[in-house]
Image: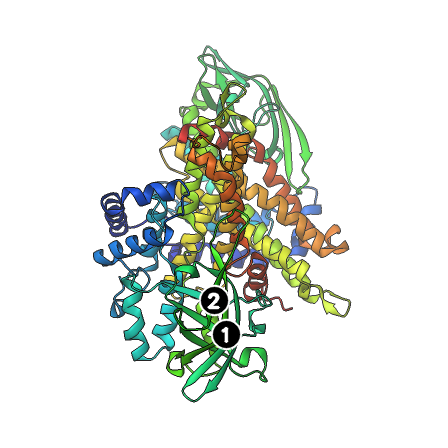
Amino acid sequence: MDFSFNDEQQMLQDTTRRFLASEYGFEKRASVLQSDAGWSKAVWNGLAELGLLAIELPEEHGGIGADPVAVMLVMQAVGERLLLEPLLSSAIVATRVIRELGSDEQRVRWLPVLADGSTIAVLAHDEPGATIRVENIVTTATPDGHGWRLSGCKSVVYHAAIADLLLVSARIEDGSVGVFAVTPDAVGVSLDALLTIDGQRAADITLDNVGVDASDRLPGDGGQLQAVVDYAVAMFSAEALGSLQRILEATIEYSRSRVQFGAPIGSFQALQHRMADMLMQVEQARSMIYRAIARCTDEDTRERRKAISAAKVIVGQAARHVSQEAIQLHGGMGMTDELDVSHHAKRLLAYELRFGTTDEHHAIYRNTVASHT
Amino acid sequence: MDLNFNPRELAFRDEVRVFLCDRLPDDIRERLRAGDHSAIDQDITRWQKILHEKGWGAPAWPLEFGGTGWSKTQQYIFETACALADAPTQLPFGLKMVAPVLMRFGSPEQQQRFLPRIIDASDWWCQGYSEPGSGSDLASLRMRAERDGDVYVLNGQKAWNTLGQFADWIFCLVRTDPIAKPQRGISFVLVDMKSPGITVRPTRLLDSSHEVNEIWFDDVRIPVANRVGAENEGWTYAKFLLGHERTNIAGVGASQRELKRLKKMATRCIRDGKPLIEDDVFASRIAQVEMELTALEVTNLRVIFDAEKNHAPGPEASILKVRGTEIMQRLTELQVEASGLHALVVSSRKSQADTDMARAAPTYLNQRKLSIYGGSNEIQRNIIAHMILNLRG
C-alpha cells in the first residue's frame, strides 16, 4: 500500500502546473474562450513542446512511457485550469484508441502526428440513444467491396469541429463493433458545430453512406474499444478532481475574506459544516479516482467496469453537491462569470453528463449487486 | 501509488483469518451474529484471554508494554478481519483509552500495576468523562475531587458510561481546581469501582438494552497515587486520548459485514414475487451504500498511509468517523427496510426464526448512537472546519 507518487509522476504534474500557471491564467483563458476558434494553437504547441501530447505514446513510438498515475496527475493539473484544448480528446482518448486498436501501419501513420500536435483526432462514439456502453452503438458499417460504408449519427463529440481525424465507432453486420478513421471533409460527413455549456467546441456528426477504405478500419474490436472508453472515464474523472479541488479551495478562501455581520462568513458554524461536507465529498471522490486509476487497465473486465462506474457515480455526485454549494456559499458572486467558480461548476456539470451520466453508471454498478452475494 | 497490501501484509491477513477460524468459539460467534448481547461481558473477556494467549491481546500497543508492535496497517487488517468474522470488539476503554495515557503520562508503578491486567482481561475498565451537563462541552464538567491529605474525596455524577456495570476500574476526569478556567482545573484519576460510595444505575436505552449507566460518586475516597500525571493537567491527557488511535474508527470491517448481511437478507426476502435484491430501486440503494463504503475503505487506507509516514494522523480521522458512522447507520436502515413488517416484532410466542430480521430494528435504533458518541458528528465537522480547512469560530 503506497499513496505516494514517484519523482517522474510528480514532475509531470509540476511541469503541467507551471506551464498553465504562466500561460493559462484566468484572464488568458477568458480570451481563448471568447475567441472565434475557441482554443489556442499557441497553448497547444506549448503542450506539445513539453511532451504532454505524447503522454499516451508507447516508448517505442517516442513516448515518455507515462503510466496511468502520471496521466492522472497531469489531468488533475489540467482540470484546475479548465483547459479548453483537446488534451483529453486527442492526446489521450484518440491516441489510445489508435495505440490499442490500430494496426502497426496505422500507429506509425498517426501516433507521431498526434504526439507533435499537428493532427487532432477525436473518438466519435456517443450517439443520441447510446452512450458509454459499446454494445448500444447503432451507427452501422457495411462492407463495400474494397472498404466500408458508414451511416449514423454521433452526438456532442467534443473537439470534433477542430479535428483532422474522426475515429468513428460503428456496428458491423455480424454484431461486433469496429472503429473507422474518417476525415471530416469526406463525402457524406456533415458536422453541425456546437458550443457546449462548459465553453468547449463540439459537433453533432451525421454520417450518410460515408466510404471508408479498408486500410482505415482499425483492427481492434469492441472489447478493446470498451477498455479505452473505461480508461477515458478514469482520466476524465481525474480532470474533474482538479475542478473539485479548486472549487473547494476557492470557496474556503472566499469565506475567509467575505465579511458580513462584522465577521468573515467562514466563522459561522452553519457554513463551516457545509464546507466540511464539501471536503469529505472531495476526499471520497479522490479515493474513488485513485482506485479507478489503479484498475483502469485491469484485464478483468467486470472488476474494471465496476471500479470505473463506481468512481463515475461518486465523483459525479460530488460534482453536483460541491459545485452547488460553492455557488451558494459565494452568494451573488457565485452567479457571475467573473470568478472561476462558475466556470468550474459548468465543467463539473459536463462531467456529470459526459462519458455516461451518473445514472447510467449507477445502473451499471447496480446490476452487479445481486450477483455478488 | 499502489492500493494493494504487500505480500507480507497479505500473509499476515491469512494468518489472522486462519486464527479466527480456529480459535473464535462458535457460541460467541453465533451470539454476536444474532445480535445477542446477553453474555457480552463473558464473551468479550473470553475472547480477550484467547487473544492474549496468542500474543495478540493488545494490537495497538508497542512491544515494550506487551503489545504486538504491529504497524497501523496490520492493526487495520486485524480489526477488519475480526469484524468480518463476527468476533467481539475488544473493549476499548482499557486497551485504547486509558492504556495510551498510562504509557505516555503514567508513573512506572501505575504502568506495571495496570497494563498487564488490561491485556490479560483481569480488569474491566470503563470511562468517566461525560456528565449530565457536560457532553460535547466536556471541559464544563463538575465532578469534584477535594484533597484530604494523601486522599482525594470524589463527589459528583458521570453519565453515558458504557458497560460500567461490569467494570473493575473507571478512569475519570474530575475538577481539582474549581476557580481556574474550565480546562485548567481538571485532573485524570483512576478509581476502583469497589470503592464505598459508588452507585451504578442503568440508563435504559431505546432498544431496551442495558448498555450505559449513570454513576454516582458520594464521598468516594481514592489515594492521590491514583492520579495520572500532574494535578490540574488532566485536560491535556484527555485531549491526547481523544486524538489517539483514530485511524481505525471508520469501522470498515463492521460495515462490510453488515453489507453482506443486508445482501443476504435482500436475497432471501421475496417482494412482489421476486427477491428484493432484484428490485431496481432497492438494488440501487444497496449499490449506493456499497460504493460509498468502497470510497471510505480507500480513504481509510490513505489516512493510515499518511499516519505511518508520520504526517499528522489527526484531523483527517474525523472524516473516517463521520463517513463511517453515516454508512453503518444507513446499512442498518436498509436492513430494517429489507425486513419490512417483520422488523416490528419485538417478541412473539414462537421464537422468530430469522435472527437477522429480529435484530434489525433494535440494531437500527441502537446504532443511532454512532453519530453521537466519540465526539458527535457535529463536533467532528467542527474539527474538520477548524483543523483541516483552517476556518475559525
Spot the residue most to the bottom: B149
Q: Residue at x 35, y 33 (%)?
A: A299
Res B141 label: none
Image position, residue B109 (x, y; %): 30, 79
Tell me the crowding category of disc 1: few under 14, some 14 to 19, or many 20 or more residues within 10 angstroms, Cα based. some
Left or right: A66 in relation to A240: left
Per the image, label 1 sits on a secondary structure element best described as strand
Toward the viewer: A190 or A276? A276
All told, the count of numbered labels is 2
Query: Callout 1, which amino acid?
Result: Asp
Q: Residue at x 64, y 31 (%)?
A: A203
Image position, residue A102 (x, y; %): 41, 29
Image position, residue B68 (x, y; %): 26, 61
B42 lies above or below A306: below
Quarter of the figure that contains the C terminus of chain B: bottom right
**What is the chain letter for disc 2?**
B
Residue marked by disc 1: B218
Toward the viewer: A69 or A166? A69
The answer to whether marks 1 and 2 mark residues whose Cβ atoms lie closer than 8 Å is yes
Quadrant assignment, res B69: bottom left
Tell me the crowding category of disc 2: few under 14, some 14 to 19, or many 20 or more residues within 10 angstroms, Cα based. some
Tell me which numbered mark, 1 or 2, is placed earlier along the sequence: 2
Toward the viewer: B80 or B36? B36
Quadrant assignment, res A226: top left
Left or right: B226 in relation to B67: right
**What is the chain letter for disc 1?**
B
What separation in Å lies between label 1 and label 2 (alpha carbons)? 8 Å
Query: Callout 2, which amino acid?
Result: Thr
B197 lies above or below A241: below
Residue marked by disc 2: B199
| Same-subunit check for callouts 1 and 2 | yes
Left or right: B179 in relation to A364: right
